[in-house]
Image (cartoon, rainbow, N blue to C red):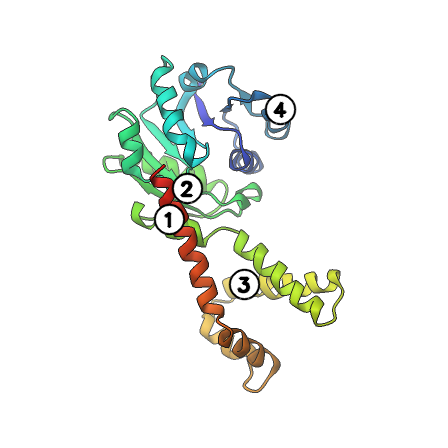
Amino acid sequence: MKAAVFLGGGRITGALAAGLRLAGYKQPIVVYDRHPEKLWALQRESRVEIARDLESAVTRADMLIVAVRPASVKEMLKEVAACGATPPKLCISLAAGIPLQNLRAWMRPAVRWARAMPSPVCRIGRGLTPVSFDRGVPKADRVRVRKFFELVGPVLELPDRQMDAITATHSPTHGYHAVATLAKAAQDAGLDRKTALLAAAHALGDGIYYWQQSGETLDELLQEAATPGGIAAATMAAMDKAGYAGVVGRGVKAGVARARMNARS
């Protein structure tokens, strides 16, 4: 039976497989990795099938998902071309920073490419997945890709030129880093670690959830929460004065620059 086939059994493959099974996805999920022993836990957790070799994996694929590190994509596609099996017409790359023009150049022209950047939060069905499509990808395949990733969270279609920026922006590491930083500041102000983490997680997680559910704009909520002369207003003013916006901006620019370096690998 044909299947969704992942080339690479790393963390994002594990998160996607878990999220797909959580959503009730019943179709076969086949994973190939050069180190099959690392796939045993994935097989137990998400009932994936482990491909014995690259040729058998490609033969099974009706949708081939390239989930190796960016620096390994070119070599992996060379191996696919040399393995003796004909790849499916629809291939999806999960490699950050590798643009569609590179993928076209590294694989036979008959292949139609999509890019997807699923968040690891897809493991619990809440992962935002930006996608972009190469020219010539028919509507039926676009719908098919979107429906596949919609099983694990919302999907946002973007032009390929915007994929680096959203990759640097939508990573949940921003939230983890912000929680850790805010909690550390709270500890320095006198809270114990457990209380500091609880307070920071509420400020970020529950506050953002309320914004998403309330229908109010960020400006409205900022004005509501930050009473002039109050504690929240003083806190935000001090953060802005210290260069908060500039720090975040530099971080996103560094992520985009790292993605563009991947394209030159």
Q: Earlier in the sequence, mark 3 or mark 2?
A: 2
- Asked if marks 3 and 2 touch (Cβ < 8 Å), the reply is no
Q: Residue at x 52, y 79 (%)?
A: 237
Q: Which of marks 1 and 3 is nearer the N terminus?
A: 1
The image quarter in which residue 263 lies: top left
Disc marking residue 96: 2
As drawn, is 201 to the left or to the right of 249? right
Residue placed farthest to the top in the image? 84
Image quadrant where one finds the C terminus: top left
Neighbor class of circle 1 (other Cα within 10 Å; few <14, some 14-19, many 20+) is: many
Vertical relation: 117 (above or below) 29: below
Q: Is mark 2 on a helix, strand or loop?
A: loop
* Mark 2: amino acid: Ala
Neighbor class of circle 2 (other Cα within 10 Å; few <14, some 14-19, many 20+) is: many
Q: Decide which of 1, 253 is in the foreground and name it.
A: 253
As drawn, is 134 to the left or to the right of 186? left
Distance Cα–Cα, label 3 vs label 2: 26 Å
Distance Cα–Cα, label 2 vs label 1: 7 Å
